[in-house]
Image: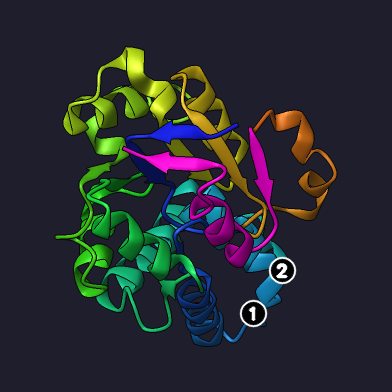
Amino acid sequence: MTQFVKAVLFDLDGTLIDTAADFVRIIGKMSAQNNWQAPPEAQIREQVSAGASAMVQLMLRHNDQIEMSEDALLAFRQQFLDDYETDICVDSCVFDELEAVLETLEEKGVPWGIVTNKPRYLSEQLLKVMQLDERCAVLVCPDDVSRTKPDPEPMYMALEKLGIPRGAAGCVVYVGDHIRDIDAGRAAGMSTILAAYGYIPPEDQNNLKSWGADHIIDTPKQLSKLLLSPSKFEYI
């Protein structure tokens, strides 16, 4: 059955943009500065959606540096964020096939946007460097709301900024790679797509169906095919 769509929203890291390589680079740099061994790339990638603290703690655990003061942990986290802000887009890129999706939406006059738990100052900088800032119709970050995903408040804010009433949320598609993305989209009444190619830990891989997404997609190519399928979505 064809679904009418007024807008498409994406999570940022691990859904629209593959940022993991830059996080791997920074953790590698920090590890080398302390004469430590960097965790495997796959393990860092799995922690991206959990944020800076999770990636720093992975580095410390991997090197048996677990008994640190809270101040020391915060200092490592701040160094991580500072290094990331300095070189935010060395290896990051839009996932293969998704640039074509963005271009098609723009050609059809359908707004696309981002609802993320990434801080605004980093999200804005990343989008600007990637020349996506002026193309993105709406950006909602944790700084903008009192309750972040999985609460639907960020989704409602995106609807408001797009001029779409909450009663028409079913005409908006939200794509994300974390259970909180799916929970937030569903709670707001949106159609949800789980990007299973994203930063999902192995322990969650067997439970993806239980998240309740309307669609589960294994590759960016499959996501592109789904979003551009006239038998699935009609953009209005």
Residue in front for this viewpoint, 147 or 177: 177
Callout 2 amino acid: His
Give the residue drawn at x 20%, y 59%: 135
Provide the secondary structure element on which disc 1 rests.
loop
Residue 168, can we see it? yes
Callout 1 amino acid: Ala
Q: Mark 1 or 2 closer to N-term?
A: 1
- Viewed as shown, does residue 53 lie left or right of 199? left
Residue in front for this viewpoint, 42 or 232: 232
- Viewed as shown, does residue 103 lie left or right of 138? right
Question: Residue 155: where, in percent of width, then height?
Answer: 36, 28
How far apart marks 1 and 2 lie (CA) works out to 8 Å
Task: Quickly name the residue at label 2.
Answer: 62
Question: Residue 105: where, in percent of width, then height?
Answer: 32, 54
Residue 58, can we see it? no
**Disc 1 + disc 2, Cβ < 8 Å:** yes
Q: Looking at the rendered structure, which numbered label has been put on residue 215? A: none
- Above or below, 24 against 81 in this view is below
Q: Residue furthest left?
A: 134
Specify start and end residues of the magenta stretch as a single range: 214-236
- Above or below, 23 against 50 in this view is below
Give the residue drawn at x 34%, y 19%: 168
- Above or below, 4 against 101 in this view is above
Task: Quickly name the residue at label 1.
Answer: 38
User: Is-magenta flag for residue 218?
Assistant: yes
